[in-house]
Amino acid sequence: MFELSFIWAGIIAFAVLVYVILDGFDLGVGILFPFARSERDRATMMNSIAPIWDGNETWLVLGGGGLFAVFPLAYAIVMPALYMPIILMLLALIFRGVAFEYRWRGERWKHIWDHAFFGGSIVAAFTQGIALGALVQGIEVEGRAYSGAWWDWLTMFSLLTGAAVVVGYALLGACWLNMKTIGDLQVQMRGYAKPLAAATLGFIGLASLLTPFQDVEYFHRWFDMPGVLFSVIVPAALLACAWALFTGLRDAKDVQPFLAALGLFVLCFVGIGISFYPNIVPPNLTIAEAAAPDSSLWFALVGTVVLVPLILIYTAYAYWVFRGKVDPDEGYH
């Protein structure tokens, strides 16, 4: 049967995925920022993402706003459950954005804004991972409201996923800088990408082993038919991406490692989707139960059908205009 709520779940999932893979690499650049060997390298790192970083965050607004508009029950449950990591993430993104603008305005406070850029990037990445881990663990719901405790989001599993996202974003950032820069900085970031790739794969493996034991439903979904097929297909695809990543780095390729690293994130996102479906808030709030009335879904869909292609077009145009290597001698204005 046709379900409009599932179309909206797909739209929001798409927006979140695009946010993760786009804002992930520019947060990764911020995480790697303190390891730059000179002011010239730091300026080059920031200039590599200066034209597109704020546009990347459009997708976060679309995902969060879409959740509020079309799945209000899910929004009302998730927000109190994850209030602290979400607020910390938003504050970190604000500090990071302010640092982007102010570090160029004078030498006196530049080191303060450099720390804000790094701190905002790592806190935003870490809290996103914590929120993901807390969601995977499941959120306690009684009636139509969150019934858990204030600190339920803080567990060893959520700390693990928080660290995994930080390392994964750093990998994306290193691969982005390998693609966008030249000379010593490119060589340095290519060198960082190799251990970061190994660490990211280790975190993926550990989280994948632990996830089926977070809830019995996950276990059945992955190890009963037909889900057991995904237990073969997804790891095989991950291995293919890992091979492309390491061979691209070995052969000093520019684009291949970045695309392969993005592939790892896409496959992890697919794995999370397989674990969750048909729930929007694990373990037992389904997409259909959380959705707004069909009249509201249709009304919002009309605008979204126009808005999403426009965002995709201007995002693609921005990346096309600023394609190629970054000139280390150019400044950010």
Image (cartoon, rainbow, N blue to C red):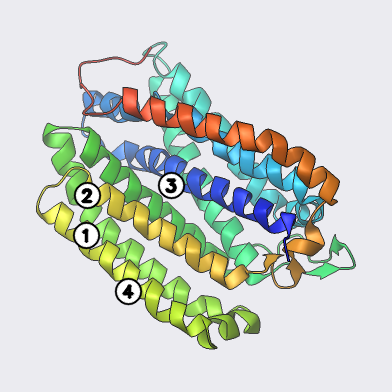
First of labels 1, 3 by sequence position: 3
Q: Amino acid at mark 4?
A: Ala
Per the image, label 2 sits on a secondary structure element best described as: helix
Name the foreground residue: 122 vs 250.
250
Residue on which the image places disc 4 = 236
Q: Amino acid at mark 1?
A: Ala
Residue on which the image places disc 2 = 256
Residue on which the image places disc 1 = 244
Residue 284 visible in image: yes
Q: Which residue is at a point 72% across and 50% down the rendered structure image?
A: 83
Please report contact status of discs 1 and 2: CB closer than 8 Å, yes or no. Answer: yes
Decide: is 326 above or below 269.
Answer: above
The location of residue 199, given as percent across then percent down, is 32, 63
Label 4 CA crowd tier, 10 Å (few <14, some 14–19, many 20+): few
Q: Amino acid at mark 3?
A: Ile
Residue on which the image places disc 3 = 21
First of labels 2, 3 by sequence position: 3
Q: Quadrant where the N terminus lies?
A: bottom right
CA–CA distance between discs 1 and 2? Answer: 7 Å
Per the image, label 3 sits on a secondary structure element best described as: helix
Q: Amino acid at mark 2?
A: Gln
First of labels 1, 2 by sequence position: 1
